[in-house]
Structure formats: C-alpha cells, structure tokens
Amino acid sequence: MTRRGLQEADWFMGDRLTLAELSLFPAIALSRDIGIDHEACPALRRWMRRVRALPGFVTMPGILDFY
C-alpha cells in the first residue's frame, strides 16, 4: 500500500473499490492474530480505515476496530 500511495492510488487494484479489497480485508485485519504488527504499516492502516468507511460496510465478527 505504501507503493500504491506514492502512486496516489487508494486501492490495491485500480482507482476504485474492487473485489480484491473485500477479499483481502478479513485476512489483513486478522493478521494481528498471527503476530503481524500493524503499527509498522501506516499505509495499510489507512487502507483499512478507507475500507471501513465505505457506505454500508459491516465488519465481520472477530475483527476488532483498532484503527
């Protein structure tokens, strides 16, 4: 996401929300459970906030809203 941010892109694929974002969100959000430190990834945290801010988005049970 850092590289995409430098390219002024907000999403993993293209310039708008895609199925890729929705598919990646649970795995990335749950990666804290296996020891991946989100504090070291500010671009990833911004992306997670962007996904959560989508109209109608509901976080699945088990994913805490840290950011």
Image (cartoon, helix red, strand yellow):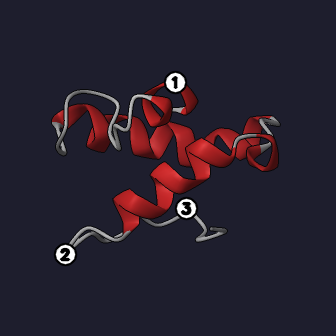
Q: Nearer the viewer, residue 20 or 14?
A: 14
Please state which of residues 40 and 66 is positioned toward the viewer in this rendering.
40
Image quarter where the C terminus lies is bottom right
Could you tell me if the residues under marks 2 and 1 are in contact, i.e. CB atoms within 8 Å? no
Is label 3 in a helix, a strand or a loop?
A: loop
Residue 50, how many percent across, how many down? Answer: 39, 60
Q: Residues within 10 Å of mark 2 (few under 14, many from 20)?
A: few
Instruction: Tell me if mark 3 has few (under 14), some (14-19) or many (20+) residues whose alpha carbon lies within 10 angstroms of its own.
Output: some
For the residues labelled 3 and 2, the Cα–Cα distance comes to: 16 Å
Residue furthest out toward the bottom: 56
Query: Which residue bears the numbered disc 2?
Result: 56
> Where residue 27 sits: x, y (%)?
50, 37
User: Which residue position is annotated with label 3?
Assistant: 63
Q: Please give the residue where the numbered disc 1 appears in the rendered image.
A: 3
Sequence-first tag of 3 and 1:
1
In depth, the one of 60 and 23 nearer the eye is 23
Residue 33 falls in image quadrant = top right
Would residue 29 appear left or right of 33 to someone viewing this image?
A: left
Q: Earlier in the sequence, mark 3 or mark 2?
A: 2
Q: Residue 17 bears which disc, if any?
A: none
Between the C-alphas of marks 3 and 1, the distance is 26 Å
Q: Is residue 34 left or right of residue 64?
A: right
Q: Label 2 sits on what residue type?
A: Gly
